[in-house]
Amino acid sequence: MKRKFAAFVIVVVVLAALAATLVGCDKATRLGDIFVGYESAGEITRAELQLTLPTGWNVLTDSTAYADSDIGYSSTLDAYIVVNDAGSLNIAQADDDKQAVFLLRDSAGNPTASGISAIKVYGVLALIRFNNGTASVINLENGKVALRADATTGVTKEVSSAVAVLDDELVAVNPAYSTVCSGTDYTPVYRASTGELVCKVYNAGGSLDGVFGFDGNYVMVENKSGTSTAQEYSTYLYAVPERAGANLDMTASAACTYNRVSEKESYYSEATYLGDGRFYVHEEWTVNSTDDYTYSYDGDYYKVYRYIVTPANGERTAYNSSYYFLNCVNAYFTNGSDRCVVAPSSFLQAGYIYSSFGLYVPESKEAEYDQFVLDYDLNIVLSLTNNWGIKLDYVERDSIGVYDLLLQYQDGYGFAPLMPSALRVYDYEGKVVIEEKEYPLTAVSMHDGMILAKTEKDDKELYGAFDMNGELVIPFEYSSIEPFRGYYTYAVRASDGAAVLLGKDGSVLEYMSDGETKPLADIAKTSKNVAIKKRGCYMYSTTTTDADGNSVTLYGIKNFRSDLGSNTVLEAQFVKGCTLYAPSLDENSVFVFGQTEEGGPVKVYRLLSDGGAEKKGTIPDWAWGVIGAACVVVLAGAVTGAVFAVRASKKRKAGADGADSAAE
């Protein structure tokens, strides 16, 4: 069975009677305990200076020229990726006087001003690519070198393909870029705390795409073989030593090796880390109907073995259950992958596992499709069909969306943001407080008491919004709507492409408080004539005259209030080239940076609400677009044995951070 990532058409059995065979779970678990919670940010009302960069430095927002680098703001460091006039990068934090402190320094202690072409930040570890084709990993907390630059070579692009920061302790190097490897089948692994090469794990071909680290002590290697439409997966598990042994090359023990590709048909294995040094391993292959098989599914027959494996002692024990868990992810997976396109850590709390392809196998051996949320002891706490774990009390449920179990919480309410079968909003306990099924939705987002939704009509994407009573207060008549941070927000009308200030009641503001000024009349635009706005604010421009009588255009920031006396957040002071920026992973954090005089230093401001520090809000908007429109809804009825799925996996890449600059 190939990795079964996205089910495009599924008919699911929903039999409430099956609850009698419920897998054990903690009865005290509430729905809100399982999923990550976000909070809305208030209306932007003020700007606070964060730091002033030295002349010649700016915040990096160019994701094209620096495609393999992080850009903009790093929340884990409370710092900025910056670039100088020579094109070299560094990381800048603010000191107590709001002046820049550079975190990357040379051997003499001076800020590195040349030679850095890419920076990737992982917690306190920074992966750096140098112009000379080497790469290094630095612990920014203590200044220790976790990976020396002379351990790598030939790294001229895509630094994360050459070096992988597996967790806060383990770093792996693709042997093709390593100076300590003569071949490509053994991947060097370093300990960040000591900078020592402690082992080389077997990893056929050397690619880092399937190499994962856990708890600073374990490495999982997942190798793919075959074609893109008929891939087979083998898995190797390693306990990483504290120090290097006499022989650096490591091969996984028999209990930690799952590779029968050469001897079994359509072989597939998958391992999931459960914490405390334990892995759940599933391996299977296809057999004939006359053979001893474990279950049948979609006309095929499978033999399955499952284990709990502890690499530290090389032992494993058989795992037996009527429930089968595939495409498992948990918070240890920080990025989207073949198993789940959305980063699990963005929606799933630590301690839980999401299985996007699960099966219930009764005595008949005819497998029934489901999805599960599990705890780390593999108890089912939630299921897509609602047969197992927490029982969600639906008002009426005759359809199931493939992503209905991928929930997030916003301001205490849970919902499925991606391709939901219906708009359903849950309280923390899991009670359905809103259920709206009239409109077919492809995406949902909640912010500041409004539920934004996207639908498709006549091949067009249209946006509208519901209030917290489930009433459609903004009709699906807009090609875009920014999440609300106040009573009005920025929207674009689909009928004529006009940008408007849209109220929470669905009204469109015709004039500002003076009764004469048109809303957004002063909005600044990029060199490509794109309006410069972010969640809750926009950049405005005004023309003035300098001391020499020359006309000068200056830029500032306004919120979306209708009152001209209170909508200015930052007075116009920036010259052309200033930037309004928000990280794509947290669009509640909004910054503006630019020069207040030609050739002067760049100042960085953060735009804030009166409530204080901004809260991280919602799964990023890019996630809305990664799901194919064909994965919309599946039936939920008493239909037995008819489960169809596309058995393929696709990697998808998140969009770049959002930064818009005033026209040069």
Image (cartoon, rainbow, N blue to C red):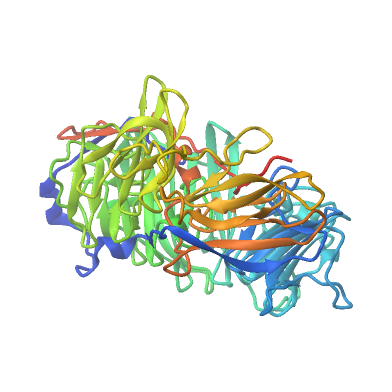
- In screen coordinates, is 557 left or right of 472? right
**Residue 14: x and y, percent?**
17, 41
**Residue 301: x and y, percent?**
35, 36
Residue 198: in sight, yes or no?
A: no
Relative to 470, residue 630 above or below? above
As rendered, which of 213 and 488 lies closer to the eye?
488
The quarter holding residue 506 reads top left
**Residue 360: x and y, percent?**
26, 47
Residue 440: in sight, yes or no?
A: yes
- Number of marks drawn: 0
Q: Looking at the figure, which quarter contains the N terminus?
A: top left
**Residue 372: x and y, percent?**
31, 52
- In screen coordinates, is 473 left or right of 462? left
Q: Looking at the figure, which quarter contains the C terminus?
A: top right
**Residue positioned 83% across, 71% down in the render:** 111
Relative to 280, residue 576 above or below? above
**Residue positioned 58% across, 46% down in the render:** 540
As rendered, which of 85 and 630 lies closer to the eye?
85
- In screen coordinates, is 37 left or right of 336? left
The quarter holding residue 454 reads top left
Relative to 232, residue 548 above or below? below
